[in-house]
Amino acid sequence: MTAAFRIMRQRFSWTVSKNYMQRSAETTGPAASETLVKIRDLHFARGERVIFDGVDLDIPRGRLTAIMGPSGTGKTTLLRLIGGQLTPDRGSIEVDGLQVQELGRKALYDLRRRMGMLFQSGALLTDLNVFDNVAFPLREHTNLPEAMIRDLVLMKLQAVGLRGARDLQPSELSGGMARRVALARAIALDPMMIMYDEPFTGQDPISMGALVQLIRLLNDALGLTSIIVSHDVQETAAISDYVYVISQGKVIGQGSPEALGNSDSALVKQFMQGLPDGPVPFHYPARDYMEDLLNA
Amino acid sequence: MLDWIRGLGRGGFRFFETLGRANLFALKTLVGIPAVLVRPRLLVAQLFSVGVLSLPIIILSGVFVGMVLALQGYNTLVDFGAEESLGVVVALSIVRELGPVVTGLLFAGRAGSALTAEIGLMKATEQLAGMEMMAVDPIHRVIAPRFLAGFISMPLLAAIFAALGIYGGYFVGVGLLGVDEGAYWSQMQSQVDLYDDVYNGVIKSLVFGLVVTWIAVFEGYDTVPTSEGVSRSTTRTVVYSAFAVLGLDFVLTALMFGA
């Protein structure tokens, strides 16, 4: 019994990386390729407001891809579309060979079990402590014995540096800690990809540094595919393999962080260099200033 | 005038759209009930939160309503020399009407508002969306256990309310006003019918439990995910539940005891 348990524990150990990271053939879709997420001609609108107007994106397997753009350009919406929480008005979203918008509930939930998502707020369940939050997906989707769940949870928490915080309630965590716990929960089921929604927003430099390092480390150590949605240019560019810049419903630039830094596009340059004025004006559209003052 | 008509039409559409959504939501919740029965822990936790934590207000209210009924009933009955019928008056009033109705209203105020606020805040803090992304259906995991717990708790709370109300009446009528103890209990025993009175009261409390819990969980799930949205949804739960309990009470009473 003890030997069997040891073997099972080894099976789930972080250190047995090869077996742990290899994805079995049956877990991938019919047309598994180097591109994990393929978005074509994506159109999506909320009422009258067009969010995406013909977006094409490719997210390669095993890489860390950043999707950046000014606030309100629909970056979070894009993650929700990839996760099947929203349905596009037109176009296709293919994840691991499966057309997300055509999946039934069961197939969609099967796909989501292979995805992890880190929400901006962490989205920890407030009635559960840190340990139970990380154990939540394991208890919901597996029949593992409690002793093994305990080991797995402690391993995930160790990976994010919060094994000692297992008994804390979400209300007792700082923003950075909450996101790290949420990250441990997101990797609990060993997903094929993780989507990060604004992971660096509101973080102090130490938490930010920890998160930046963790995201890159987990991506490489676990052979994940990562999608980061963010407008924190420096931090995101520092760890990304490829960057898409979205604005006004379209992809306005793409390439390696270095290439985008040297882009000729005024809009891309304004965003990457954080210039206050440019194609995206500093001033909200208004009537002439002088006229406005004189005709009070 | 045209604006008024347009507003009325828009309001009508919105009402029927919400009603349709609420019905679909109820259907999905009912589909999720078997999954809750397989995991009784979820149900027990909610029975505690919805039922047990509502006990103090139900116990206090039950006792005081019974005491007031006995006081008022005695003052009227004594004029006709019929004070020995006090037990019947208290029991029938509570078992048929006040038990289910007052418990329904208190349940809406205590448990219903708490359910709406809790679910609404879970939505506002992306906990429900997080569950969806973890391939866990929030309707099965969060809504169905709360819905079932409300449905089970309400008739039990109404029964406790009624029992304590009758004892409250006994305390005032027999203990303080001197009504004969034997008459209090024996008249009640002979005049209160198990089927016509007790069962009908139970049916009322079951219906109120179903409707109040449905309103509470739907309002929470359908809330606008902001502080203001959650606050409005919580208010709506209490107001709609009160209307529903009082309106349905009239309909059920007419069906049960009407000519």
Image: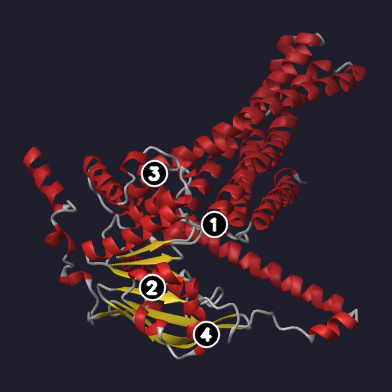
Q: Amino acid at mark 3?
A: Val
Label 1 and label 3: CA atoms lie apart by: 19 Å
Residue A188 located left or right of residue A78: left
Q: Is disc 2 placed on a helix, strand or loop?
A: helix
Q: Give the residue drawn at x 58%, y 54%.
A: B120
In which quadrant will I find the N terminus of chain B?
bottom right
- Which label belongs to residue A237? 2
Residue topped by disc 1: B123
Residue B161 locus on image (x, y percent)? 65, 29
Q: Does the residue at mark 2 contact the one at mark 1 (Cβ under 8 Å)? A: no
Please state the chain letter of the residue tagged with numbered disc 4 in the rendered image: A
Instruction: Give the colour scheme of this rendering.
Output: secondary structure
Q: Amino acid at mark 4?
A: Gly
Q: Give the residue drawn at x 80%, y 15%.
A: B84
The image quadrant of residue B4 is bottom right
Q: Is disc 3 placed on a helix, strand or loop?
A: helix
Of badges 4 and 1, the one in the foreground is 4
Please state the chain letter of the residue tagged with numbered disc 1 in the rendered image: B
Residue topped by disc 3: A130
The vertical placement of B119 against B12, above or below, is above
Is residue B100 visible in the rendered structure shown here?
Answer: yes
